[in-house]
Image (tube, rainbow, N blue to C red):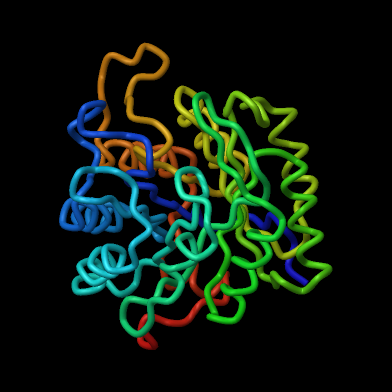
Amino acid sequence: METKNERGKLIINFTPNGMIPTKEMTPFVPISPEEIANDVLKAAELGASIVHLHAREPDGTPSTKKEIFAEIIRRIRAKNKEIIIGVTTSGRNINTFEARSEVLDLDGDVKPDMGSLTLSSLNFNKSASVNSPEVIQKLATKMLERGIKPELEAFDIGMINYAKYLITKEIIKPPFYFNLLFGNIACAQADLINAGLMIRELPESSTWAFAGIGDHQLKMNTLGIIWEGNVRVGLEDNIYFDNPKRTQLATNIQLVERIAKLAKAYGREIATPREVRKILGLRAPEEI
């Protein structure tokens, strides 16, 4: 069985907008399907092999509507069928299984490759992401039935332990992909001890990426590069280029470009989408 952290090429997971950033906060956050797709295509040119999509309504609020996701995916795949497309099933704003899982029903040329699966409930600064065991298991089961790879999101060690529980129930199967997110006020903090412990607790056959919330993004991304892991980067997690000063708003392209330059400086090659598809056991672009 593959080890959980082999030395290899860098996987860049691109997160263009999330649920929180608005045009009032930063004019650079993509909201419309056209804006989102354009940023994804540019990020792919810089080396992003996975994109983690959130849809927005025309007024900028988060959306679970599969029609909006379909338009974003269609725009991306019209020009790039290589990049791995992940979609959110977040419970941060909308908490019913039916709404959260709607996007997993997409099929054909707009079927997503991956779907996010947050492994427990958690508190953010001003809101909660409620993920009951029942909903988590129903989402994981639907992904398994639909042939969609879970993008496992862990904000602390307890969430990794819950992933292991899902493995024993055979609801999620290897190879596994984990986003390890640090710096949220109520979860694992962005330091070497927490990062090391979370990596140590990962199940075998796991590929992992480091993400940092807000001021911690660059630090954790850099650590992911140095520790021979991978990175999650984009305006979803951080809207500034010069943390912690916060005087310069970032664009998605600036954030991804900086990661590519850091990887080059450290001697890490960047993985192509085809290579990542093989690592994660995903369908080839020709099968889309």
Q: Is residue 4 left or right of residue 207?
A: right
Q: Is residue 253 above or below residue 172?
A: above
Q: Is residue 159 left or right of residue 224?
A: right
Query: Depth check: 84 or 57 in front?
Result: 57
Image x and y of residue 256, in percent:
34, 43
Image x and y of residue 75, in percent:
20, 67
Residue pictured at 63% horizontal, 49% vertical? 131
Q: Is residue 231 above or below residue 105?
A: above
Q: Is residue 190 above or below residue 271?
A: above
Residue pictured at 38% horizontal, 82% vertical? 107
Query: Depth check: 115 or 136 in front?
Result: 136
Image x and y of residue 168, in percent:
83, 68
What quarter of the picture does the N terminus occupy?
bottom right
Q: Quadrant of residue 49?
A: bottom left
Q: Quadrant of residue 128?
A: top right
Image x and y of residue 240, in percent:
33, 25
- How many numbered discs sit on the rendered protein? 0
Residue pictured at 52% horizontal, 24% vertical? 125
Query: Depth check: 157 or 275 in front?
Result: 157
Residue pictured at 46% horizontal, 30% vertical? 218
Q: Quadrant of residue 84?
A: bottom left
